[in-house]
């Protein structure tokens, strides 16, 4: 027998199962539809639990926003281009779904190279050893020329880069977000931080031109955010730059009296970062909106999600 005293459990108070609240019930379980060759059946069959429940609810909300012609803003890091998701965003712009596209300076560089050459993303480690990292002449010269031309003509950075591409021997225009946004009249704003992008290493770099064109894009973004009431904003894979830019642009819109309170903010990323969570999902939606975080690989989750949105649109007769 132990030298230590044990508690006596004979006096505990119990309840019946019917009295206990539960978080999961059988109606929420997934539906197995292996014999149905239909995405809609697959999507409907996902469990109504945790991330799958959020994904299905967000698809319905997004479809409703599209049907009501509410703004749908997409903010994205460069990783989205490198994982091959650009054709989906281009199709969404073509269909009039995306009202504003937003990226950082790395996103600009990768899209620019894909448009010209159909390839991008160098081996950083190998080229760093030789001192050649970021020193592709065409990218450095042409993009810096674009910034100077943009500053001289009153264009934002996104517009300047798209106009520059129109003058160059582009081999893959159908894969370019810049050219597609320009074609379909979608504002595409670029938010550059001097010293973070490879084109800033080149002798053609003009810091004043970079600052002027990216600042114009900031003001364009502020204007777009001023119309975001009732809409959707998606953040795809920018951990620092775009969450900070979004927060400041939202502040400008609210300071000028625009009632941007009720919108849905969604962060898709492979891990949870502080700034996307606070600056996009949580803080901006406290006074009436909704915020969600969906964790997973962009090349899987983003196409899956948008296919779900169009399944909802077809169900509602809006596709």
Image (tube, helix red, strand yellow):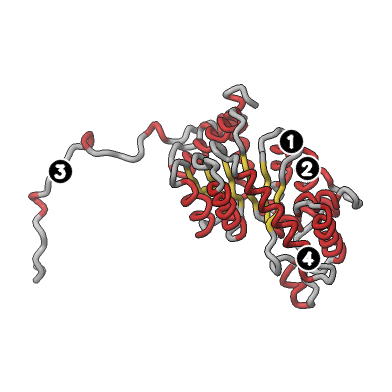
User: Looking at the image, which residue is at 54% across and 49% down?
Assistant: 255
Secondary-structure class at tag 2: helix
Q: Residues within 10 Å of mark 4 (few under 14, many from 20)?
A: many
Badge 1 or badge 3: first in the primary sequence: 3
Whether tag 1 and tag 4 are in contact, CB under 8 A, the answer is no
Q: Position of residue 173 (x, y in %)?
A: 84, 45
Any mark on residue 199, and which? 4
Q: Which residue is mark 3?
A: 14
Mark toward the viewer: 1 or 3: 1
Badge 3 or badge 2: first in the primary sequence: 3
Badge 2 or badge 1: first in the primary sequence: 1
Q: Which residue is mark 1?
A: 94
Q: From where the camera sits, is residue 108 visible?
A: yes
- The picture quadrant where one finds residue 130 is bottom right
Any mark on residue 180, and which? 2
Nearer to me, 247 or 3: 247
Q: From where the camera sits, is residue 78 visible?
A: no
Q: Position of residue 81 (x, y in %)?
A: 71, 52
Mark toward the viewer: 3 or 2: 2
């Amino acid at each position: 027998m132990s030298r230590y005293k044990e508690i006596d459990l004979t006096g505990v108070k119990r309840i019946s199962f019917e009295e206990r609240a539960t978080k999961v019930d059988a109606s929420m379980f997934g539906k197995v539809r292996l014999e149905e060759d239909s995405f809609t059946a697959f999507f409907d069959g996902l469990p109504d639990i945790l991330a799958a429940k959020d994904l299905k609810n967000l698809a319905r909300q997004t479809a409703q926003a599209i049907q009501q012609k509410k703004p749908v803003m997409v903010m994205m890091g460069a990783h989205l281009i490198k994982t091959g998701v650009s054709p989906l965003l281009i199709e969404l712009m073509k269909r009039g779904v995306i009202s504003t596209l937003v990226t950082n300076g790395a996103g600009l560089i990768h899209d620019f190279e894909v448009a010209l050459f159909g390839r991008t993303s160098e081996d950083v480690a190998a080229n760093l050893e030789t001192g050649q990292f970021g020193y592709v002449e065409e990218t450095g010269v042409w993009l810096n020329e674009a910034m100077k031309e943009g500053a001289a003509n009153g264009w934002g950075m996104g517009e300047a880069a798209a106009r520059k591409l129109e003058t160059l021997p582009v081999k893959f225009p159908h894969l370019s977000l810049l050219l597609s946004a320009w074609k379909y009249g979608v504002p595409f704003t670029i938010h550059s931080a001097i010293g973070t992008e490879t084109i800033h290493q080149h002798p053609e770099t003009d810091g004043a031109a970079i600052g002027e064109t990216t600042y114009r894009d900031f003001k364009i973004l502020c204007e777009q955010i001023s119309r975001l009431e009732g809409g959707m904003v998606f953040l795809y894979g920018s951990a620092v730059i775009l969450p900070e830019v979004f927060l400041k642009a939202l502040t400008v819109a609210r300071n000028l009296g625009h009632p941007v309170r009720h919108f849905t903010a969604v962060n898709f990323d492979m891990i949870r970062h502080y700034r996307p969570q606070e600056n996009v999902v949580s803080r901006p939606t406290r006074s009436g909106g909704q915020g969600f975080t969906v964790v997973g690989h962009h090349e899987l989750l983003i196409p899956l999600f948008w296919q779900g949105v169009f399944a909802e649109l077809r169900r509602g007769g809006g596709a």
